[in-house]
Amino acid sequence: MSMIEIHDLCFSYGQTGILKDLSVSFDQGTFWAIGGPNGAGKSTLLNLMCGALRPESGHILIEGERLSDLNTRNVASRIAVVRQEYVPAFEFTVAETVALGRTASLRGAGFETASDKTAIEEAMKATDTLRFADRSLAHISSGERQRVFIAKALAQNTPIILLDEPTSFLDLKHQVEIYDLLKHLQIAKNKTIVTVTHDLNLSRQYCDHILLIGAGLDYCFGKCGDILTKDRLAKYFNVDGIALKCGGCDFFLPVGDMSSLAAEKDSQ
């Protein structure tokens, strides 16, 4: 079942074309990466997929319904969005931040019900954030904070989670912890997960499929093992490198002209 279908999507900023005639679908329970060079339109596409931006032409279907026909509450019941990590301006606690994920579900006077409180607690348990529920969001580490934002998305209880570079500010340990968590959510809860990323090697380990967006309004998508080849990455990112095989997966190490590995790159 396709959770998200994109048909002939076009979008521009002023006279600058960003996306043109893009068509791709994301099936239920799959883990997708969106990769490409800076400015290619990855985050723009994510904003189009959640309704934050409107396309110039083409359309997006969410569970078979046009995104443009859905109201804000309806979209929020289907799609949770995790933005790039940030420190909030207000002194929310971890629990208060996660509770914001239930906003779209509140009824009547807007007070949390027992089911809301259960959803919040379960989301924090799943992300290992319950142990610092009462701490200020501004006073925890970047890795902990990113898990809180994923907990907020989980509390929203949507079938789709969109993430914009969720590991961009994290060290290696916290990067793999976030991807371990996302993979667990995909498998255990059958979530459809789409993440914008610059780390194609992490994508190769964890994601099922990838959509590459080129700077020249060209695209390719499919299984990570089929798409993430040395020649294709050199084309899309305009950089040479070395292909390495580990554990049955091919990984790509970019190599510059002044790198100590430049000679090995030229020999491949």
Image (cartoon, rainbow, N blue to C red):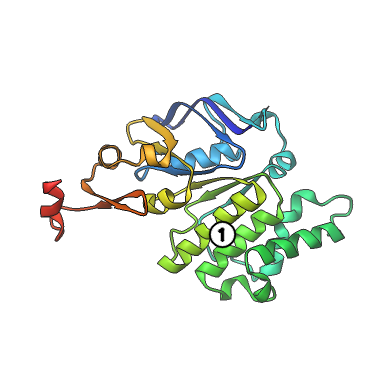
> Which quarter of the picture shows residue 12?
top left
Q: Nearer the viewer, residue 222 or 134?
A: 222
Q: Label 1 crowding class (10 Å Cα cut-off): few <14, some 14-19, many 20+?
A: some
Left or right: residue 190 versus residue 235 is: right
Residue at 70% over, 44% down = 76
Tag 1 secondary structure: helix
- Residue 193 is situated, as x and y percent measured from the top left of the image, at 57, 46
| Kind of residue at disc 1 | Leu
Please name the residue shown 58% across and 30% down the image.
5
Instruction: Give the residue at the far right of this rendering.
Output: 108
Horizontal and vertical percent position of residue 107: 85, 50
Of residues 14 and 107, the one nearer the viewer is: 107
In this image, 150 relative to 195: left or right? right
Q: Which residue is denoted by mark 1 in the rendering? A: 181
Residue extending farthest to the front is: 248
Please state the total of marks drawn on the protein image.
Answer: 1
Q: Residue at x 71, y 56 (%)?
A: 155
Name the spot of residue 142 as percent of width and height, x first: 51, 68
255 vs 31: above or below: below
Please indicate whether residue 219 sits to the left or right of residue 108 in the image: left
- Camera-side residue of 41 and 79: 79
Q: Position of residue 137 (x, y in %)?
A: 61, 70
Q: Quick check: 21 left or right of 151?
A: left
